[in-house]
Amino acid sequence: MATTIILIQLLIVLALIFIGARVGGIGLGIYGMVGVFILVFLFGLKPGNIPLDVMLIIVSVITATAALQAAGGLDYLVGLAARFLRKHPDHITYYGPLTTWLFCLVAGTAHTSYSLLPIISEIATKSKIRPERPMTVATIAASLGITGSPMSAATAAVISTDLLGGQGIELKDILLVCIPASLIAILVSSFVQNRVGKELVDDPEYQRRVKEGLIDPNETLDVTEETGLAATNPQHKYAKRAVWAFLFGVFLVVLFGSVPSLRPSFTVDGELQRLSMPQTIEILMMSIAALILIVGKAHVGDAVKGNIFGAGMNAMVSIFGIAWMGDTFFNGNIEFFKNGIADIVTQYPFLFAIALFFMSIMLFSQAATVRTLYPLGMALGINPLALVAMFPAVNGYFFIPNYPTEVAAINFDRTGTTRIGKYVLNHSFQLSGFITTFVSIGVAYLIITFLY
């Protein structure tokens, strides 16, 4: 009887996740909260832990990033990246994804990729390189940048005090494991993708569009062409200062995360306690936001009007509802999971990575996936370092080609080589997605094996 009730609860949770994902926006958060209501008021489960640390970190980091956008800093960086990529068109399949990854790694959000994807597509098209090759890897690289970024909500969730932060895992561990793993994964994927598909001039869809006059086959790349705001644009002459202020904030986050002894300590009830990393990030990034606004001569009102701020607030609401529902369900039935699957998962940890992968497909959020399933992984006794190595598995939402970055990449590729197949799931992003997932987790396991 108890098992039947738990299965009913699980079906309700999955149904609400599906509905919330279909609605989009803050739908995940709203329907997640409906799930909390049902689990608590109808099934009598104790409410789980509210992911306050993660939500507050999202607010602080997104505020700083939105301030950078308002000051023209993001456009300034895009202009620099465009110039670099245009100087190396023959290596766009490697440099395009690496640039996108670096942007997302620093900013902590995949939304920075929207500015780079059209640049990558145009450089590839005019250089007669099949745009599908760099575009697919670059789209996946944006996600990998999040699972390794000191500024992302997903990393904040992992190192929060009620998750792996309470198990002795520090920010430096995430950076040391996930950054090299994702870098190698991107290079491997670029190498493979560079040999996939027909050459652009031989692609039937490209030939059709040329024949219909949609594409000029004689257009060539002008390396002096600028996209975005140039570094010398007087409209944002303070953008460079804003960028340096933001990078200073990133440096401080990495510094205090890598050297915990530098963080302030306080005596509480006779016990010496050090400032937690989530609190450190919150204090630093909100302060950096003020610094950016000052040195970048930006208006506060412009910061909240940008797409970065809106996307961040959507993420916060989504995590609030969906993570609380997941925590309520798993903690409310933790004995069932311990007795039923603990031995299997402990013996074969990769099974938990598969669970992370499929949950991310439903949640469309790395941070929400971490907050939903990592408490279960900890309760099942999985090694915290193994959970760090599995971190890239939360990037599985490429599997169904309806995530905004994938849709944008398809639309930006005017040659039609980046596409969704006849059967939907046979789309351009599958190969790069699976290669980067397998390679990054494999490399991460090697790192924790030999480094720790």
Image (cartoon, grey):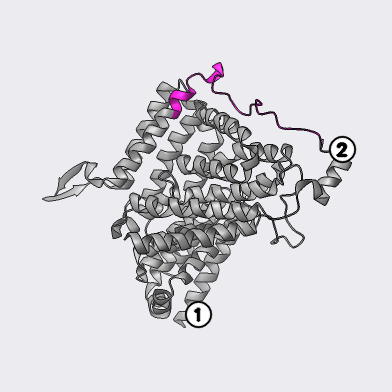
Q: Residue at x 47, y 83 (%)?
A: 1
Q: What amino acid does circle 2 point to?
A: Gly
Residue 270 in view (yes/no): yes
Q: Residues within 10 Å of mark 1 (few under 14, many from 20)?
A: few
Do residues under tags 2 and 1 come within 8 Å of each other at their CB atoms?
no
Q: Residue lying farthest left? A: 270
Q: Is residue 181 above or below residue 7?
A: above
Residue 274 lies within the magenta run = no
Q: Is residue 36 above or below residue 306?
A: below
Can you identify the residue that label 2 sits on? Answer: 213
Can you identify the residue that label 1 sits on? Answer: 4
Provide the residue span drawn in magenta: 218-243
Please provide percent x and percent y for residue 376.
40, 67
Q: Residue lying farthest bottom? A: 1
Counting residues from the start of the chain, the first of labels 2 and 1 encountered is: 1
Q: Residue lying farthest top? A: 234
Q: Residue at x 63, y 59 (%)?
A: 431
Quadrant of image for the C terminus: bottom left
* Residue 361 or residue 316, whichever sits in front: 361
- Foreground tag (2 vs 1): 2
On the picture, is 141 further left or further right than 340? right
Please provide percent x and percent y for residue 68.
47, 30
* Residue 190 or residue 402, whichever sits in front: 190
